[in-house]
Amino acid sequence: MMLGKVIGTVVTTISHKDYKNRRLLVVQPLIVDGEKPDEDFIALDNTQAGIGDTVLVNREGNGARQALKNPDACVISVIVGIVDSVYIES
């Protein structure tokens, strides 16, 4: 699991059957100061998230398939929650 910020959407005219009726969102990983930033990635939305939302993302294939309740889905990243706030104590 990881935290990220939704920074965009992906629009397709033709999509894989496992992606039908699901939105694809571009997610930017959130990091703490001093960490090396990861690259942005695409995740299936399972929560009705939108641009600007902080989200919890499952980036592991088996867990993502379980979240979608589809054991054969062709997916790695799924947004599984919208985060209201984050507090980091230093």
Image (cartoon, rainbow, N blue to C red):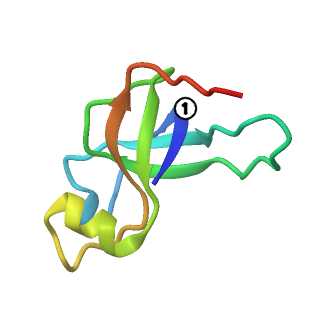
For the C terminus, the image quarter is top right
Look at the picture and state if 14 lies above or below 76. above
Looking at this rendering, what residue extends furthest in the right direction? Answer: 34
Look at the picture and state if 46 lies above or below 14. above
Local SS, label 1: strand
The residue that appears at 63% across and 37% down in the rendered structure is 30
Among the 4 quarters of the image, the one containing residue 29: top right
Q: Where residue 59 sits: x, y (%)?
A: 46, 61
Per the image, the residue denoted by label 1 is 5
Q: Where residue 56 sits: x, y (%)?
A: 42, 41
For the N terminus, the image quarter is bottom left
Looking at this rendering, what residue extends furthest in the left direction? Answer: 69
Q: Where residue 84 sits: x, y (%)?
A: 39, 20
Is any part of residue 8 visible from this angle? yes
The residue that appears at 82% across and 50% down in the rendered structure is 36
The residue that appears at 28% across and 58% down in the rendered structure is 19
